[in-house]
Image (cartoon, rainbow, N blue to C red):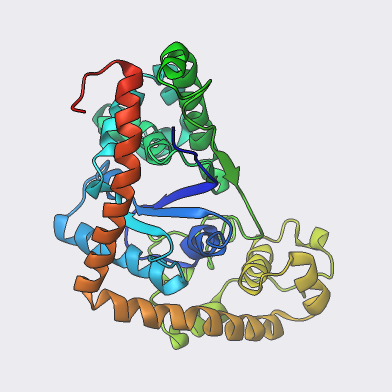
Amino acid sequence: MATIGQRVFSGVQPTGNLHLGNYLGAIQRFVGLQDQYECIYCVVDMHAITVPQKPQELTRQIREVTAAFLACGIDPRRHIVFNQSQVSGHAELAWVFNCVARMGWLNRMTQFKEKAGKDRENASVGLFTYPDLMAADILVYRATHVPVGEDQKQHLELTRDIAQKFNNDFAESIARNGFGETYFPLAEPLIQGPARRVMSLRDGAKKMSKSDPSDYSRINLTDGPDAIAQKVRKAKTDAEPLPSEEEGLANRPEADNLVGIYAALSGRAKADVLSEFGGSQFSIFKSALVDLSVSHLGPIGSEMQRLVADADYIDAVLVDGADRARVLADQTMREVKDILGFIRAR
């Protein structure tokens, strides 16, 4: 059996219009993990089709997410960057997990309830079972760690339940095939740093979203310096100066959001930011946040635009990454088939 080291897997849906929330909540963290783990980063295009997509738009969005990975500092030579649909092991293992997971487990998934809404009978079967595909995404590489936001913890818990049930159900076969007591690892969550949830610049009670009708509610990763500066200056605040202690941010969602963004972009704690700006008016703090945001995000936007314009390069990165990912996924699927008792070519 191959030895599995400390391996990270994570994916981003190609839903278009990536924004600051996607960056601070996911992509920035991916970059920081590269020196600690073997990393596999995936554009999860198969997840995207659980809701209707326009094919040409989906192609564009897959390339845009890939460009964001690269522009933010993910190195596709040291690590693996690819799109999910190029590696068939994801779908194969998802079917196995459809037969391992229980209906009751999936019925408890809160994101399905939120996305399907009241008209659940018309939701796709894929939308209901996509947590099994998410488990397959992680476990087809036998990943040991997954960077997750608070809204994804339930899915990782389900992944661990599926892995545990597979290990229990097939314990005898796992041992007989020489894999020891368990086959799939129970992946651990990686939840790090401030600003886990980035809220709307227009309403601190709402999560930053590409679907918000106001473009001023978010900073898009492709925004130029002028747009970034304007959006920060127009961000909603309140009339009080910034507090000097974190407790003073309670019941002040817009202030809390902007302080969290500053903390995340600067790599500091909220308490440190408040020790510097406590007592200041928002005009002073926003000026500093403009400078920080433009210096940090401006180069990312410029590089994304350059990369998106070079579709051949983006596609080559994805093909190379898929080729390397497929080697790992195919090994897992050969071993899973042996554990299950399937007959395969040797």
Q: Position of residue 139 (x, y in %)?
A: 42, 36
Q: Position of residue 196 (x, y in %)?
A: 60, 55
Identify the image quadrant of residue 118: top left
The residue drawn where x is 68% and y is 70% is 238
Q: Position of residue 114 (x, y in %)?
A: 42, 38
In this rendering, does residue 119 appear at all? no
Q: Is residue 201 left or right of residue 169?
A: right
Q: Please identify the quadrant where the C terminus is shown.
A: top left
Q: Is residue 158 left or right of residue 335?
A: right
Residue nearest the viewer, comparing 102 with 286: 102
Above or below, 162 relative to 15: above
In this rendering, does residue 50 appear at all? yes
Q: Please identify the quadrant where the N terminus is shown.
A: top left
Identify the image quadrant of residue 320: bottom left
Residue nearest the viewer, comparing 308 with 123: 308
Identify the image quadrant of residue 100: top left
Q: How many marks?
A: 0
Q: Position of residue 338 (x, y in %)?
A: 31, 21
The residue drawn where x is 28% and y is 38% is 89
The residue drawn where x is 47% and y is 30% is 184
Q: Is residue 174 left or right of residue 335?
A: right
The residue drawn where x is 54% and y is 80% is 296
Above or below, 207 relative to 310: above
Above or below, 32 relative to 240: above
